Image: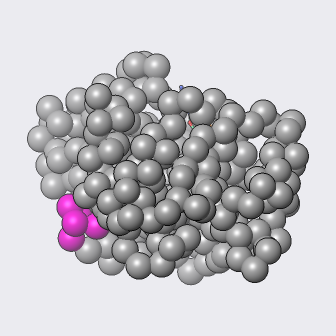
Amino acid sequence: EKHYAVIGDPIQHSLSPDMHNAGYQALGVDAFYQRFQVKADRLGEAVQGLHALGFSGWNVTLPHKEAILALLDTLTPQAERAGAVNTVKIHEGQMIGHNTDGDGFVRSVQEELNGFQGKKAVLLGAGGAGKGIALALAEQGMKLHILNRTPEKANELARIIQREGGMATAGEFAPGDWLKDVDLLVQTTSIGLHKEPFPFSLEGISKQALVVDIIFNPMETLFLIEAKQLGCRTQNGLRMLLYQGALAWEFWFGGQAPIEEMRQALKHGLA
Ligand code: ATR
């Protein structure tokens, strides 16, 4: 039997064990996935421990995604680029750090958006989550406009994307002309986690826009409720969670993850 895990703090509400174990069951994979709470100051010991205990891989969530970089043997281009790791695989005794968050997000909007090249994405928030998503969308050829409460972080992220040959600008964390012709609007800040209202209105937004909030608890933030009322298609963070998990699965096992069973497990886990 192979062993997988997710480490983070807090971790008790993680749905990753439900999702991955349901996948193992669906395909008859002899593996077991569990969650471990790991305090920030014990990360090094925890990583050594998982390795020593023979775990084949693990997911990494807050607050460890960046701190774990220095503890691993090699990084994939996705982890390198994001400066963060959400998936580790043991390969020939080496710990390989990977990141499936950005590409998981891309997959989660692919169908609804029907192509990325040259379309306009506005990103609200330039924190860790926002960065990974922005880099992946820019790689797909989207034109990005990045807004963050602390403007320096939006500027910095736009510069990184430009340096890599992507298209990105930064602007004020406020409504603006961008609302009129946005194709994809992504809310990546923590506003909404505690049911706070979003600080500005989306009035005037293009009805063609797909509006995503990466939060899934609550299932529908006030931000998404407003977008829906304004006639936009909306999506919460569950699809991103699902696809980052599916890509982690594929990194570990190869082949295709049993996406429908994993989706059902998330739904039940939340109910
Ligand atoms: P994560 O890694 O989950 O993205 P983070 O790096 O702490 O977490 O980033 C949180 C994001 O939410 C940041 O963009 C933060 O804005 P600042 O860079 O200005 O701190 C944003 N955020 C959190 N609370 C906010 C609020 N009340 N209004 C606006 N932005 C907020």
Quadrant housing the C terminus: top left
Question: Residue drawn at (76%, 69%), measured in percent from left and top?
Answer: 95
Image quadrant of ligand 1? top right
Residue 228 as seen in the image, left or right of residue 251: left
The vertical placement of 156 against 218, above or below, is below
Q: Position of residue 231 (x, y in %)?
A: 12, 41
Residue 7 position (above or below residue 89)? above
Q: Characterize the magenta stretch by its predominant secondary structure.
A: helix
Question: What stretch of residues is rendered in magenta?
Answer: 110-114
Q: Residue at x 14, y 32 (%)?
A: 229
Which quarter of the rendering shows the N terminus?
bottom right
Residue at image position (29%, 51%) is 263
Whether residue 169 sits left or right of residue 233 in the image: it is: right
Q: Magenta includes 146?
A: no
Q: Position of residue 156 (x, y in %)?
A: 67, 57
Q: Is residue 50 visible?
A: yes
In the image, taking residue 163 as reference, residue 260 lies left or right, namely: left
Q: For residue 36, which quarter of the picture?
A: top right
Could you say which is closer to the camera, residue 165 or residue 187? 187
Q: Nearer the viewer, residue 66 or 245?
A: 245
Q: Is residue 263 above or below residue 143?
A: above
User: Residue at the location (53% across, 59% down)?
Assistant: 31
Q: Is residue 111 magenta?
A: yes
Q: Is residue 223 visible?
A: no
Q: Position of residue 56 (x, y in %)?
A: 66, 64
